[in-house]
Amino acid sequence: MNEFSFSVPQNITVGKGSLAKLPEIAKKSGGSHAFLMSGPHLAKMGLVEKAANSLKSAGISVDTFTDIEGNPSVETVDKATAAFKEAGADFIVAFGGGSPMDVAKAVGVTAKYGGKYGGSITEYEGAHKVPGPIIPLIAIPTTAGTGSEVTAFSVITDHSRDYKLTVFSYEILPAYAILDAELLTTAPASVAAACGIDAFIHAEEAYISTAASPFSDAMAEKAMSLIGKNIRRFVANRGDIEAAEAMLVGSLFAGIAFSFARLGNVHAMSHPVSAFFDVPHGVANAVLLPVIAEYNALADHGRYLTIYNDISPIPAYEEEFEPMMLVDAIRELCGEIGIPANLTEAINNASKTGPVSAEEIENKIEAMAVDAMKSGNIAVNPRSSRQCDIEMLYRKAL
């Protein structure tokens, strides 16, 4: 058993309609002026205004920032930091999926430690470079996927390098999280599928990580059970509150698991795919998962059976189970919930400039592999990997 330690210092509220508790929680944080960060989709739906009005009704001033894209950039963090400072706010509310959460954490750092004009989040890239507590942050997820409301990571795209940088520090953990399943009911099926499988992969990679511990295992096992048994039902009907709550809590537990056990090759390889081809993070993970699960099968020591029984409608017994059965079950699940069949399809679906040729993709594989090897997740993948292995896996995923 690895030596391990853990701390879960956050205050987490879970329940249908719990968004109504935002003003109460905001006052607990000691803030009087909120900087509410979200995306344009939730703004158009009126949900940002609803959250802002609930704060205003409690006498809390609010400024909003909703110009946050998927796979958010360093430039977006810079703009948001400047807007935060201009507003004179004293706490942040991150409202949305993983992108607003990542930007909010980054702004919490740069607004606190970056000087008068904020500095750059690139200065904090890597592990444990944030010098202390950030601006108080309340996280309210509207997707069941990233688990960002309980993770110590912020992932930001640096377009100058075609690279997704990671800030890892327990200082950026949100002080409070509100999980309200009613906020998940408006998600399109494609978003529910991509986010849901992303949450499952968080748990799966944490579970097979060489840095796993009894604590992270407990979180990962419960997460896989909740997500695996509810993802089909939730994608089919996002209005199913029971399934939505299971997905949301599963995502929460998965986030806690990988904050302590890290991830693996799937996430190490998916970030360059998103950086070079703008493929949504969850989709990139999902199309890589079966290929990497097959690669890692050689290192399995019994955990694949547990994972299989969480996602397969028909359970298997130890004496009949073979690791490749999990690979087949993953492909079946991804197909049922509408995930692209391979990396080529995912890249072309994401392209805003027309079809992407096989040659264009091939020309990026070496650079993507170089970037993937920079990830700390490679080191805890259950099967060791060299750059040539990563290049092979990319080609196999095509």
Image (spheres, grey):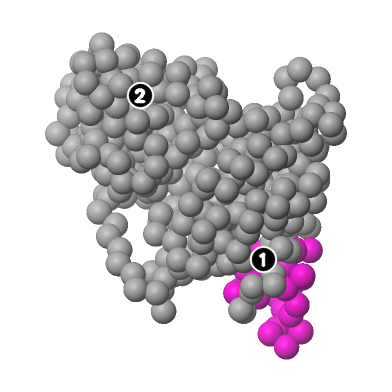
Residue appearing at x 52%, y 35% in the figure: 164
**Above-or-below relation of 332 to 98:** below
**Above-or-below relation of 299 to 253:** below
Give, as a three-letter code, the residue at label 1. Asn
Q: Is residue 348 magenta?
A: no
Q: Measuring from the top left, give residue 4's x and y in whole percent.
A: 33, 70
Label 2 to label 1: alpha-carbon separation: 37 Å
Q: Measuring from the top left, give residue 206's x and y in whole percent.
A: 51, 61
Residue appearing at x 51%, y 19% in the figure: 40
Where is mark 1, residue-wise? 296
Q: Quadrant of residue 333?
A: bottom right
Q: Is residue 314 magenta?
A: yes
Q: Quadrant of residue 381?
A: bottom right
Q: Is residue 45 visible?
A: no
Near-viewer residue (130 or 235): 130
**Above-or-below relation of 347 to 243:** above
Q: Measuring from the top left, give residue 275's x and y in whole percent.
A: 60, 32
Residue appearing at x 73%, y 88% in the figure: 319
Tell me, for residue 120, which label it has, or none.
2
Mark 2 element type: loop
Residue appearing at x 53%, y 45% in the figure: 374
Give, as a three-letter code, the residue at label 2. Ser
Near-viewer residue (248 or 75): 75
Mark 1 element type: helix
Quarter the C terminus occupies: top right
Residue at the bottom extreme? 319
Quarter the N terminus occupies: bottom left
Range of magenta residues: 303-329
Near-viewer residue (127 or 241): 127
Q: Quadrant of residue 83?
A: top left
Tell whether 326 sits left or right of 47.
right
